[in-house]
Amino acid sequence: MGSYRVAVIVGSNHSASINRKLAQALVRLGGETLEFEWIRIDDLPLYSLDLEGSRPPEVTRFTDQMKAVDAVLVVTPEHNRSLPAVLKNAIDWGSKPAPDNVWRGKPAAITGTSPGAIGTALVQQHLRQILGILGAHVMGGEVYISFKPDLIAEDDTVTNESTRVFLETFMGQFATFVRKLAAP
């Protein structure tokens, strides 16, 4: 069956990010066919056309890492009903210049968590639209997690049984989605 390399992008630069905690739990639930690679985005300079010609080394590292993976898992908070600036900045760098768009053709799954009742519903909708326009194959289905302080243990296990089963199912569906769409 083989293994597929999956970029894990956390759309937060908060040192105690609950979305990073969720991402760690998802990686733990990821199964054997997905090999996860954490992609750093918080060190990317603010996108500017002025920097495109002589790309900063952080941007080159980011785009090289993204080109090397088969798929993307984005775990993000919601800021003002949309994307956090750090995530939008990474998306912009990855899409420029257009012929080198790292998002095109990549299977992608989106999720996130927040303390609110609707999780990250609106940012996920916005992110689906952006990644779709850039040519990513965004997996259907919605995974909104309302974060509670005891939801994920120190060892990254999900403590709520129904949430754990739900997230295992999500990761199994993502593995199947990647297997069907990732370039051989």
Image (spheres, helix red, strand yellow):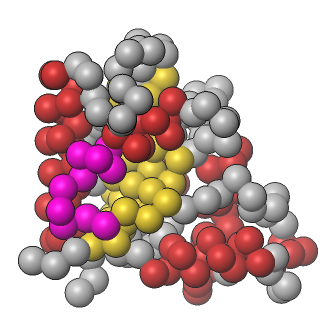
Taking the magenta stretch, the answer to whether it contains residue 31 is: yes
Residue 84 shows in the view:
no
Q: Is residue 158 visible?
A: yes
Q: Is residue 183 above or below residue 174?
A: below
Residue 29 in the image: state x and y as whole percent.
23, 46
Quadrant including the C terminus: bottom left
Q: Quadrant of residue 32?
A: bottom left
Which residue appears farthest toward the front when viewing the image? 155
In percent of the image, x 34 and y 72: which residue is there?
Answer: 5
Number of marks in picture: 0
Q: What range is drawn magenta here?
A: 26-35
Query: Which residue is nearer to you in this view: 93 or 33?
Result: 33
In this image, 158 relative to 1: left or right? right
Left or right: where 78 falls relative to 104: right
Q: Quadrant of the N terminus?
A: bottom left
121 lies above or below 105: above
* Rendered residue at 14%/41% (across/down): 169
Percent position (x, y) of residue 66? 51, 73
Q: In this view, does 104 lie above or below 146?
A: below
